[in-house]
Image: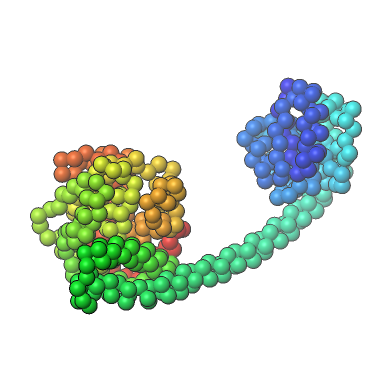
Amino acid sequence: MARIVHIEDDPANRLLVRKLLVRAGHEVIEAEDGIAGVRVAVASKPELVLVDLNIPGLDGFEVALRLRAEPGFERVPIVAITAEGDRDTSLSVGCDGFLQKPIDARTFAETIERYLGGARDAPPPQRDLRLREQSQRIVSHLEEKVSELSRVNERLREADAARTAFYRNVTHELATPMTPIVGYVRLLLDQELGALEPAQLRALASMQDCVTRLRQIIDNLLDVTGLETGRMHFAHMPYDFRDVVQRVLKVHRPAFEDARLLLVSELQDVSLPAVGDADRLGRAMAQLLDNAAKFVPEGGRVGVRVDRLDGLLRLCVADSGGGVPSERQRRIFEAFYQVDGSVTRQHGGTGVGLAIARRTARGLGGDVTVISPCNELIGGVEFRGAAFFLTVGERAPMQLDAGSSPRLGV
C-alpha cells in the first residue's frame, strides 16, 4: 500500500480518484488547492503526488517546482493530471508523468502502479527553454498577486482608519451627555435639590452604579482610540506610586466585599515618589484589579503587592483563579481579545482593559506582564492563579505621547 497525495479542487474528480486508488489498496490524502497541497505533501511524506494543473492558490506547475525544492522529494514521483495543460512544460518543471482527463477508470490504478514502480515519462527536448518560460510566467503571476495584495492592504488601512474615526466619534458623542447625567445623579443623591424618600435614594444609588459602569466603558473606548491615533498625551507631574495604589484599593474594596472576594494587600510603609501621570496610572491599576475580580470565583482571593525592582516601581496583582492558558498569554494584551467569551459575557467587559493597562505602563516607562500559573506569597497568603506585574519608571519619559507606542491589538 502506498500513501498518495491528490491535489484537486473538483470534488467529483477527487471522489473518483479516491475510489479507484483505495480499491487498489492505497491510502489517499486530499487537498483542494496548491498551497494546502504542498503543506499536506510535506507533512505526510507520500510515495506519490497526483496534482491537477489547474488548481487555485499555486497551480500544478508551481506545486511541482515547490515540492522538488523540498528535502526528500527528489525521487518522489509527481504526476500531473489535467483536462487542459502542457505536457512538455509539466515534465520540464519536475513532473514525472502526465495524464489527460478524463481518466480511464479501467487502467488508472495500473498506470499509477507503474509510476510507483519507477516508470518515468521521457523529458521533452529544449527542457531549459521550457523552464525559463515557466519561470517568467511565475514571476508575472507573483507580480499580479503582489499588486492585488497591495490594493487589499490599502483598503484595509482605509477601513481601519474609518473604524478608528467611528469609535472616536461615537465615544465622544456618548461621553458628552454623560457629564450632566453624572452630575445630576450626584446632586440628587446628596439631596441638594430637595429631600428624597429612602426608596428614591435606593433607586438613585442603583442608577449611579449603572452610570459609573457606563462611564468606565466609555473612558476605556476613548483610551483605545486615543492610543491608536496617538492623540493620548500623558501628564508629567510628581506623584507617589504607593498613594496611587492606596486610592485605587480604597475605591475597589467595597466591590470586592460585595463579590465575596478576599482582597489582600502588602504595601511598603514608605513613600515611592515618581514623575508621570498619576490619573492614567491609577486607571491602569484599576484595570488589573477589575480583570482579577472578573475571573476569580466567589470566595477567592486577590493579592496586591508594591515594591521597587531594578529602578522601576512595581505593582503585582495576583489571584487564586484558574489562570491564563499559556497559548493565550500573549494575546490577552490585544484590544478586544477575550480569553473566554462566555465568562466575559457573564461578567461584562469589552476586552480592552489589559491592552490599555499595558500601553499606559509603556507610556510611563514600564510594562505589564503576566505569569500563569504563578507562585506568589502576599500578606502571608499563597496565590497560584495568574500574577500581573505593572511597572513604571520613577521618571517617565518626557515625550509621553502614545502615538510612539505600537498600535493596540497588534
Q: Residue at x 66, y 43 (%)?
A: 36
The residue positioned farthest toward the left in the image shown? 269
Residue 69 visible at all: no
Which quadrant holds residue 9? top right
Determine whether 95 is above or below 152 in the image: above
Q: Residue at x 65, y 37 (%)?
A: 40
Determine whether 209 is above or below 299 in the image: below
Q: Residue at x 70, y 50 (%)?
A: 57
Q: Nearer the viewer, residue 343 or 72?
A: 343
Residue 131 visible at all: yes
Describe residue 261's horizontal placement relative to residue 127 as left or right: left
Describe residue 160's horizontal placement relative to residue 27 as left or right: left
Q: Residue at x 87, y 40 (%)?
A: 101
Colouring convention used in this rendered image of the protein: rainbow
Q: Nearer the viewer, residue 287 or 104?
A: 287
Describe residue 97's horizontal placement relative to residue 228 as left or right: right
Percent coordinates x, y for residue 115 in the rendering: 81, 29
Percent coordinates x, y for residue 17 in the rendering: 80, 33
Which quadrant holds residue 280? bottom left
Q: Nearer the viewer, residue 193 or 353?
A: 193
Which quadrant holds residue 42? top right
Q: Quadrant of the N terminus?
A: top right
Determine whether 343 is above or below 120 in the image: below
Count every numbered label the image shows and give the total. 0
Percent coordinates x, y for residue 139 in the rendering: 72, 57
Percent coordinates x, y for residue 5 in the rendering: 72, 34
